[in-house]
Amino acid sequence: MSAYFQDYVTVAAFVGLGIVLVLALLGVASVFRPTHPHPTKLLTYECGVDPVGSDWSQSQIRYYIFGLLFVIFDVEAVFIFPWAIILERLGVFGLVEMAIFIVVLLLGLIYAIRKGVLKWE
């Protein structure tokens, strides 16, 4: 067997071992876990509030907008930290580039504020 295929055999052996290990541990867990079926366990639970009404309810769009704004500013932080580490190597170009990036994000935040997206009623 060539060295090329021997590498694939090694990877396949580790994948197979991983699958066998996962299945074995799931089997052991199913044998030893406690099972006490009760109708209360099948109820929907949401933040300590007893479920009332039907299973389906419409969520307000502002939750998604807040989530989207969080993701935008979280991504901004992901870009700013590496930039801060290599700022000296980038020089003025890096500083101007990041200033433009932050200004664009601030314009988006100002737009969201003016549209009233961040008002919680």
Image (spheres, rainbow, N blue to C red):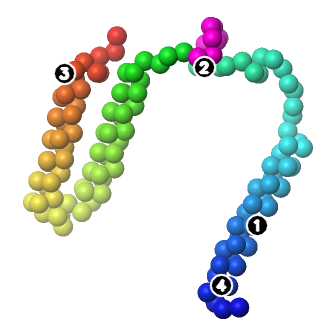
Task: List the residue tagged with mark 4.
Answer: 5
Kindly indicate whether the residue at mark 3 contacts the one at mark 4 (C-beta within 8 angstroms): no
Q: Which residues are magenta?
A: 48-56
Per the image, label 2 sits on a secondary structure element best described as loop
Task: Please count the marks in the image.
Answer: 4
Per the image, label 4 sits on a secondary structure element best described as helix
Which residue is drawn at the image coordinates 67% and 85% (left, top)? 6
Q: CA distance from mark 4 to mark 3?
A: 62 Å
The local crowd at label 1, few if under 14, some if 14 to 19, many if 20 or more residues have their Cα within 10 Å, is few
- Give the image quarter of residue 30: top right
Quadrant in which the C terminus is drawn: top left
Q: CA distance from mark 1 to mark 2?
A: 39 Å
Q: CA distance from mark 4 to mark 2?
A: 52 Å
Per the image, label 3 sits on a secondary structure element best described as helix
Q: Position of residue 103 (x, y in %)?
A: 15, 41
Task: List the residue tagged with mark 1.
Answer: 17
Q: Give the mark, 1 or 2, whose residue is nearer the N terminus.
A: 1
Task: List the residue tagged with mark 3.
Answer: 114
Looking at the image, residue 50 lies above or below residue 8: above
Looking at the rendered image, the disc whose residue lies closer to the viewer, 4 or 3, is 4
Q: Looking at the picture, tell me which residue is in the foreground, 23 or 48.
A: 23
Task: List the residue tagged with mark 2.
Answer: 46
- Of all residues, the one furthest to the bottom in this rendering is 2
Question: Which amino acid does the dot numbered 1 rest on?
Answer: Leu
The local crowd at label 3, few if under 14, some if 14 to 19, many if 20 or more residues have their Cα within 10 Å, is few
Question: Which amino acid does the dot numbered 4 rest on?
Answer: Phe
